[in-house]
Image (cartoon, rainbow, N blue to C red):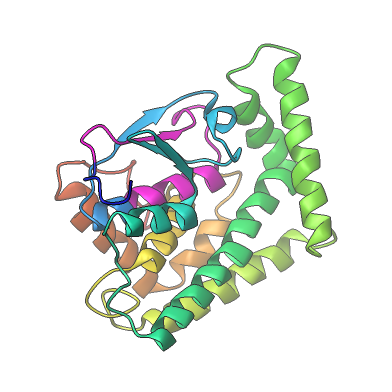
Amino acid sequence: TAAEPWPENATLYQQLKGEQILLSDNAASLAVQAFLQMCNLPIKVVCRANAEYMSPSGKVPFIHVGNQVVSELGPIVQFVKAKGHSLSDGLDEVQKAEMKAYMELVNNMLLTAELYLQWCDEATVGEITHARYGSPYPWPLNHILAYQKQWEIKRKMKAIGWGKKTLDQVLEDVDQCCQALSQRLGTQPYFFNKQPTELDALVFGHLYTILTTQLTNDELSEKVKNYSNLLAFCRRIEQHYFEDRGKGRLSSGIRFS
């Protein structure tokens, strides 16, 4: 039930970190981890090759809390709220609507761009995506699963009007999204000034992952690096919610060069 306290053994599941997980799922997982850190709710991260198939929605990450399983940031925010923890309770209705709109922007632009790069950009597909996605499985299953997933994502891209986009157009979308986020953030520490909300967790998850993921080239991360306040924002959250809590650096850290 809602009022039950947060258990000590709450667990978050995602794919294998080193060799398997793709940028978009890594970003989604990091957003949820950041959100739970901001709520001061302990979570143990467990990496499983079959995390995607363990998830009731087929989406990663998912959390296992008590006898409940919840996947993705939106539903996890609602679930945590029902347990009495919210980061956005202090916002008025106008701010809540604005927060929602910016979260939509991140999901419609950044997440879609990540999926496009992973599954529609031939260089990335050939050099990174297929090998990583299929890595836990024997031949020919590794190829079958990767092609299946690629077909599914390409169909989704067609449905939302991204089927014919070029890589340059997608990178331009990413730039516009970063510009909007940078302008909204301004000189504040967080999007709604002093206290982080789920929007901050979501933006951090995506931007930090883009900044720290090695792709076939640096075009994607360069788009984020153009905005110094977004870089400082990522560093601030990494330091405050991960390093200062003894979680250590999240990865090799942001490559600022």
Location of residue 139 with respect to 12 vertically, above or below: above
Seen from this angle, which residue lies furthest top?
138
Measured as percent of width and height from the top left, residue 146 is found at 72, 30
Whether residue 102 is visible here, answered yes or no, is: yes
Q: Nearer the viewer, residue 77 or 107?
A: 77
Q: Quadrant of the C terminus?
A: bottom left
Measured as percent of width and height from the top left, residue 180 is found at 51, 80
Location of residue 19 with respect to 36 vertically, above or below: above
**Is residue 52 shown in magenta?**
no
Measured as percent of width and height from the top left, residue 155 is found at 82, 49
Location of residue 148 with respect to 118 vertically, above or below: above
Q: Nearer the viewer, residue 93 or 179?
A: 93
Give the residue drawn at x 82%, y 59%: 159
Q: Nearer the viewer, residue 159 or 16?
A: 159
Highlighted magenta segment, given as a residue range: 7-34
Q: Nearer the viewer, residue 86 or 172?
A: 86
Question: Dividing the picture into quarters, in which one does residue 173 lie?
Answer: bottom right
Give the residue drawn at x 42%, y 83%: 184
Measured as percent of width and height from the top left, residue 151 is found at 81, 40
| In this rendering, position of residue 68 left or right of residue 122 | left
Location of residue 124 with respect to 220 vertically, above or below: above
